[in-house]
Image: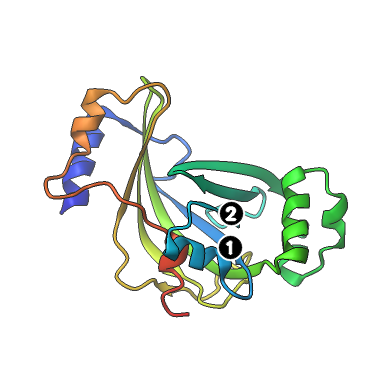
Amino acid sequence: MDLLAIRARLQAVMQPDPHAEEGRYQIRSLYFDSMGDRALREKLDGVNEREKFRIRCYNFDPSVIHLEKKSKRNGLCGKLSAELTEEETRNIIAGELGWMAEAEAPLVRELYCKMQTLGLRPKTIVDYTREPYVYAPGNVRVTFDYDIRTGLADTDFLNPDCVTIPAGDAPIILEVKWDAYLPDIIRDAVQTPGCRAGAFSKYAQCRIYG
């Protein structure tokens, strides 16, 4: 009911993201972690400085694949990104890593270093649907993320038919992002009585089964 109410208000003042098909798109991420689940444990323990690596594509399209590193420090988030080809992605998943040491993108070389020293490996697939809205003043972007699904131990990232299952009783995630300022009309539109902002990790949610 919260989704329906906020969606109706947003549609009155915002535009659907022009990159979305019929107002939404599918996101698939492949997260990396160590043998001891360092990234997961740091998230659950609330470690102040932490990072996660993931590979991401949209609508199961292998022509555009991104390697991303999300970092968090003192509550502030940052993200670095580099493009991967389909062949490079398959090599990483298969453990064929030698080429990464000489890769042009610094982020690829960094992942290679941490795969060698920290034992990072592909851990699980995270699938979900994103419904995005945009508002030009303030460069505001509001998204709903729902139908979060886990691939369990499956890392067949480029297979659109790999089996995923609902990640427990995962909530609908509302995110609001802006640049210089957040217009009051958007601030008011996303308010919901009884709800407050909080952190949520899709990766941690998708590890609930192990």
The residue positioned 15% from the left and 54% from the top of the image is: 1
The Cα–Cα distance between marks 2 and 1, rounded to whole angstroms, is 6 Å
Give the vertical position of 170 relative to 63 (above or below): below
**Count of numbered circles on the image:** 2
Q: Residue at x 47, y 63 (%)?
A: 203
Q: Mark 1, residues whose alpha carbon is within 10 Å: few (<14), some, or many (≥20)?
A: many
| Relative to 160, residue 199 above or below | above
Asked if marks 2 and 1 touch (Cβ < 8 Å), the reply is: yes
Between 46 and 175, the one nearer to me in the picture: 46
Three-letter amino acid code at the position of disc 1: Leu
Residue 20, quarter of picture? top left
The residue located at (88%, 50%) in the rendering is: 102
Residue 102: numbered disc:
none
- Report the side of 85 relative to 79 (left or right): right
Category of crowding for the residue at label 2, using alpha-carbon neighbours closer than 10 angstroms: few (below 14), some (14–19), many (at least 20): many
Q: Which residue is mark 2?
A: 56
Rendered residue at 50%/47% (across/down):
72
Q: Position of residue 54 (x, y in %)?
A: 60, 57
Give the amino acid type for the residue marked by disc 2 in the picture: Arg
| Label 1 sits on residue | 30
Q: Is residue 83 left or right of residue 73?
A: right
Secondary element at image label 2: strand
Q: Look at the image and tell me whether residue 23 can be seen.
A: no
Which badge, 2 or 1, comes first in the chain's sequence?
A: 1
* 1 left or right, relative to 171: left
- Percent across and percent down for residue 164 are 47, 73
Q: Nearer the viewer, residue 130 or 110?
A: 110
The image shows residue 35, relative to residue 42, as above or below, that is below
Q: Position of residue 140 (x, y in %)?
A: 37, 29
